[in-house]
Amino acid sequence: MPEQSPDAMLDSLLEFREELPADKFVLKVMHRVRRERRRRRLILSVFGLIGAAFGLAGALLLAEPLARIFAAMPPIGTTQVVLFVVAAVAFYAWFMNEDVDLAL
């Protein structure tokens, strides 16, 4: 015995019909989809450029203090700090069993 749906409108939408929707309807839907895609790309581009500008401004503001910090450090000390940080990251990745996926 087939299950009876309480919603008659849903049944009428899902029932089999011989005729296909008109091309005009399909073209209108596809046009709206393209328009929304363009709008989404525009919004993402604008906010991406704004974010990049803020990132560049922050980098410019921090460039001088960072240059002073690294200029004051001896080269051997800088190398040791970099090696220590890389070793800490490698140990963390090993300890936490992180699986790095480099596939794009």
Image (cartoon, helix red, strand yellow):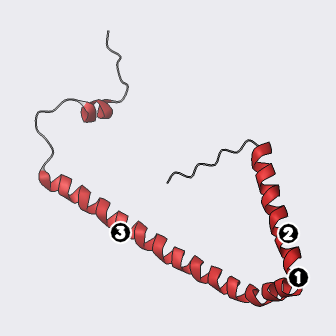
Q: Residue furthest left?
A: 19
Q: How far apart are marks 2 and 3 (CA)?
A: 47 Å
| Direction from residue 8 to residue 100 in the image, left or right | right
Q: Which tag, 1 or 3, sits closer to the chain's start?
A: 3
Residue kind at label 3, given as amino acid type:
Arg
Quadrant of the rendering where the N terminus is positioned? top left
Q: Distance between the residues labelled 1 and 3?
A: 50 Å
Crowdedness near tag 2: few (<14), some (14–19) or many (≥20) residues, C-alpha within 10 Å: few
Residue drawn at x 80%, y 68% is: 82
Crowdedness near tag 1: few (<14), some (14–19) or many (≥20) residues, C-alpha within 10 Å: few
Which numbered marker is on residue 81?
2
Residue drawn at x 85%, y 84% is: 69
Residue kind at label 2, given as amino acid type:
Val
Q: Residue 52, percent across and down?
A: 58, 79
Residue drawn at x 81%, y 50% is: 91
Q: Mark 3 points at which residue?
A: 38
Q: Do the residues labelled 2 and 1 touch (CB within 8 Å)?
A: yes
Q: Residue 51, percent across and down?
A: 59, 77
Q: Which of marks 2 and 3 is in front?
A: 2
Q: What secondary structure is found at the residue carrying circle 3?
A: helix
Q: Are marks 1 and 3 in contact (CB under 8 Å)?
A: no
Crowdedness near tag 3: few (<14), some (14–19) or many (≥20) residues, C-alpha within 10 Å: few
Residue kind at label 1, given as amino acid type:
Met
Q: Mark 1 points at which residue?
A: 73
